[in-house]
Every structure is written in C-alpha cells, then in structure tokens.
Image: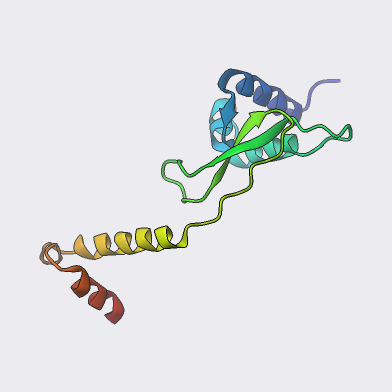
Amino acid sequence: MGTTNTGMHVIKALEAFEEFKRMTAQEFADYADIGRYDAHAVLNRMNKRTKDGVKRIYVADWTHGHDNARRYPRAVFMLGDKPDKPRPKPDIRLNRQRSEHKSIKAIRMTSVFNMGLTRDKIREIRRSL
C-alpha cells in the first residue's frame, strides 16, 4: 500500500522544518510546490493533537510580512509539542493611519494638480465623495 498525497505532504513538511526550522504556510506551499490551501490543511492537521495526544508542530510566532497579500497576522510554525502563541490583537489606530495614508496617496496621484493639496483639503475632498 502506497503513501497518500497527504502523507507525502506531511513527509515534505517534516523535511522542510528540519531544513528551515520556522515556516509559514505560504513558505511551505512554495517549498513543497503545492497550493496554499493544501499547505494550510497539512499544517493545521499537523498542529492538532493526535490520538496519542501529541502535536507535531506549534505556532511559535505571528508575522505580517507577505508580498502582495492582505495584511493580517500569519502563523509561523516550528516543530515540537509546545503551546501555540496567541494571535496578536489588531492595532486599530495603526490600521486607521495606514488606511488614511493610502487614501491620501490615491487622491494626490489622480492629478498633477492634487500633489500640492494640504491634508485638510484632501479630507474635505474625501468627505464630498
């Protein structure tokens, strides 16, 4: 009886953790050349306790750094049977600042004439839209 695709992905994940020590699901997907949904499924299954009561991996940290992706915390996994690090709470003030900065840039770049607008004038334009 051969190894299933899932079994092959688990073996590939164990090899990757031996080599890199810490990985996100996207990094594992790139390493194993599989889809991100398959990578998440494999890592989530490895993060759950087996019938023997043992986990293979745990959430060691959280990161925001992924190119061209939505900005939300992503789990960084490591080998071992330790408690998962809790997901960080969102920084509402920082998110609001980031959003406002993005909209200000969008308004300034729509026309050459908008490049010299003050922040108050840009807020006034945004309210009128």
Which of the pair 40/117 is nearer the observer?
117
Q: Quadrant of the N terminus?
A: top right
Q: Residue furthest right?
A: 51
Q: Give the mark count.
A: 0
Task: Please say if 43 is above or below 113.
Answer: above
Q: Residue furthest bottom?
A: 128
Q: Residue at x 19, y 74 (%)?
A: 121
The spot of residue 102 in percent (x, y) is: 31, 59
> Residue 18 or 12: which is nearer the viewer?
18
Q: Is residue 30 left or right of residue 86?
A: left
Location of the C terminus by quadrant is bottom left
Horizontal and vertical percent position of residue 24: 57, 35
Using the image as rendered, state which of residue 2 and residue 62 is in the foreground.
Answer: 62
Residue 69 in the image, given as x and y percentages of width and height = 46, 47
- In the image, residue 59 lies at what x, y percent? 64, 38
Name the colour scheme: rainbow
Q: On the picture, is 119 further left or further right than 97?
A: left
Q: Residue at x 74, y 31 (%)?
A: 81
Name the residue located 53 percent from the left edge and 30 percent from the top edge: 30
Quadrant of residue 58 within the rendered picture: top right
Horizontal side, residue 19 vs residue 126: left or right: right
Residue drawn where x is 25% and y is 60% of the image = 105
Q: Is residue 77 left or right of residue 110?
A: right
In which quadrant of the rendered view does residue 16 lie? top right
Q: Quadrant of residue 48?
A: top right
